[in-house]
Image: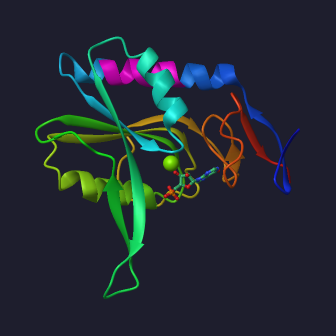
Amino acid sequence: MLQLHDKQFVPFISAQEIHSAIVSMATKVAADFGEEVPVFIGVLNGSFMVVSDFMKHYEKPCEVSFVKLASYEGIASTNNVKQLIGLNQDLAGRSVVIIEDIVDTGNTIVALKALFEDLKVKELKFATLFLKPEVYDKDIKIDYIGIEIPNKFIVGFGLDYNGLGRNCPEIYQLKE
Ligand code: IMP
Ligand code: MG
């Protein structure tokens, strides 16, 4: 049992299962890209552990960078406008794979797709360690999926509950 703030979490997915899922994603991506050198983009904060393990098992030349998605209120509307921060590399003409820790509603993926298409990338693909298929309702194809999970709140392996839990090497789920 894991106590984070006011909530309790119970073990859900082992470090070994996570490892196997990441190795299999890295192997598939490497096979798909042939001789091309992709740029992997990790979305902070949650994806740092996934990207680290993914890179260790990607056995061909590749590059890596990290971004953060910042939100700010538009001046003229109440729409939540998203902005990319931290990108210091020209991605025009490059094949980019965005690596996420988890895709839930897919709102983040939608924002990322729009922002990266503005950068004139050659090809944009999405990889995520976890997907909640019961919740994801967007049209964007998630090209590489590690593990599909039910609609439960999870922590560990980079994922947090109000800042805590990212350092756990395995996944815990909220105790019912
Ligand atoms: P989205 O709903 O697909 O846009 O998910 C956005 C973000 O919500 C993810 O990148 C995570 O930071 C967070 N998130 C979604 N589901 C979970 C969860 O089960 N545990 C922890 N964070 C989550
Ligand atoms: Mg995330």
Q: Which residues are magenta?
A: 22-30
The foreground one among 87 and 50 is 87
- In the picture, the quarter occupied by the N terminus is top right
Q: Quadrant of the C terminus?
A: bottom right
Residue 139 at least partly seen: no
**Residue 173 horizontal side relative to residue 24, left or right:** right
Taking the magenta stretch, the answer to whether it contains residue 104 is no
Q: Residue 114, image x and y in percent? A: 26, 59
Where is residue 54? Give x, y as percent. 45, 23
Provide the major secondary structure of the magenta segment. helix
Q: Is residue 42 above or below residue 164?
A: above
Q: Tell whether 24 sits left or right of 161.
A: left
The residue located at (33%, 47%) in the rendering is 86
Q: How is the image coloured?
A: rainbow
Residue 80 shown left or right of residue 150 in the figure:
left
The residue positioned 54% from the left and 43% from the top of the image is 46
Measuring from the top left, give residue 72's x and y in whole percent.
40, 71
Find residue 110 and report its horizontal and vertical position in percent: 36, 59
Q: For residue 22, say whether it is visible.
A: yes
Q: Left or right: where does residue 93 sit relative to residue 172?
A: left
Q: Quadrant of residue 21?
A: top right
Question: 56 above or below 160?
Answer: above
Q: Count of labels shown? A: 0
Residue 28 lies in the magenta-colored region? yes
